[in-house]
Image (cartoon, rainbow, N blue to C red):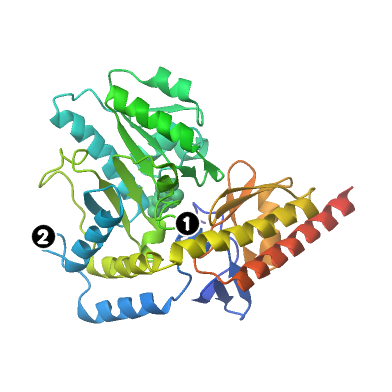
Amino acid sequence: MISPVLPTYARAPLSFKKGQGPWLETDAGEMYLDMGAGIGVCSLGHAHPKLVAVLEEQARRLWHTSNLYEIPNQQALAEKLVEHTFADTVFFTNSGTEAMELAVKMARKYFHSKGQPDKVEIISFEGAFHGRSAAGIAASKGAKMIDGFGPLLPGFVQVPFEDLDAVKAAINENTAAILLEPIQGEGGIRAFGAGFLKDLKALANEHNLLLIFDEIQCGMGRTGKLFAHEWSHVTPDIMLIAKGIGGGFPLGACVATEEAASGMVAGSHGSTYGGNPLACAVGCAVMNEILSDGFLIDVSRLAGHLRQGLEGLVAEHPDIFTFVRGEGLMLALGCKVPVPDVVNAGYDEQIIVVPASDNVVRLLPPLNMSTGDLDEAVWRLDRVAAALERRLDISA
Ligand SMILES: *Cc1c(COP(=O)(O)O)cnc(C)c1O
């Protein structure tokens, strides 16, 4: 019999009643160290006092009015994003996928409004993950994501990761945009090089294409800059934000330059919930915290500390872990044993890590962890590796 919850997830038999900072507590009172942060969402950890206070205060005053009226929290958050990014304008959504959906519509509408309605094609990269909507799966093209869901939304072509010649070959008179995650998340924490991003920007300029960055996972401070593309000094025309911006409250955004957004007018797009007072109150508090003095520098410092610990694990357990890669607090451990074994052995040692493609486990911890808790994470992963080594010896 089918479960009351549609069984599209292979869930771990774990449930938590409470969270505090990077710690999650089960019903039985066991404490798990959360190095996944709800897939890079709880960027300030669980139950951050400032977020709790802001949400409680807003919940007592006003929950929802709809976008038929002005929403001061929404305007404040949009102004913050405009001030601190390349973007001139923001549309708020409830999820990353919805931000992706708007980016596709905005790119198409842009060329349509310029009298080039055939320019609809978007080029994406192998290993991409842009969400589970019709446009999202057509852009991502992962086998499990698309199998049985055809016909796919037309207008999406995919090229190998970081292959500039393949991008050039894919460009034709109908190409509208190039879409990528500056650091692929689900694809296994794979970063595009700064040089490649510069080449792409030049190519986009040369062929009059829009550049769309999906920073849903790598943005909002995770790499030690507010957005990952800042390291490369290459700015997109449109960018997707979600996950970290809500700190656990569902919130996303599609941000754009005035030019890229120029096709969008009253009636072109909408959302009942998008940018509602509760979500934007929390979003403002998250932004304030991430932009507070020294916060992002601390992310880089913590990232260096964690990375050093993980490099030590790779050196000590070469039969289990093969490499560390990633940027900031968006790190991956390459695995020589099956990734699910590592994740499950993590549960045994009460540490949460997240699987990804390309034989890696991801570490996406809260951005404000203490070095002591990061050390604890490395010790727990050390015990994970030791447990897996014992199993290898038994089977050998
Ligand atoms: C999570 C994610 C999405 C989808 O976001 P949802 O909030 O799950 O809809 C899209 N792109 C990237 C890079 C992501 O990490």
Residue 282: x percent and y percent?
A: 32, 69
Give the spatial CA distance, label 1 vs label 2.
37 Å
Q: In the image, 385: left or right of 42?
A: right
Residue 283: x percent and y percent?
A: 32, 65
Residue 87: x percent and y percent?
A: 26, 48
**In the rendered image, the vertical position of residue 75 relative to residue 230, given as above or below:** below
**In the rendered image, the vertical position of residue 305 relative to residue 22, given as above or below:** above
Using the rendered image of the protein, determine whether residue 72 is visible from the camera's viewpoint. Answer: yes
Task: Give the residue pinned by disc 2.
Answer: 68
* CA neighbours of label 1 inside 10 A, class few (<14), some (14 to 19), many (20+): many
For discs 1 and 2, the disc positioned in front in the rendered view: 1
Pick the residue in front: 180 or 17. 180
Residue 347: x percent and y percent?
A: 66, 64
Dot 1 falls on a residue whose secondary structure is: loop
- Which amino acid type corresponds to the residue marked 1 in the rendered image? Gly
Task: Give the residue pinned by disc 1.
Answer: 224
Residue located at (18% from left, 46% from top): 269
Give the number of callouts: 2
Residue located at (79% from left, 60% from top): 387
Locate residue 205: give its quadrant.
top left
Instruction: Decide if ligand 1 comes within 8 Å of the CB at mark 2.
Output: no
Q: In the image, 91: left or right of 9?
A: left
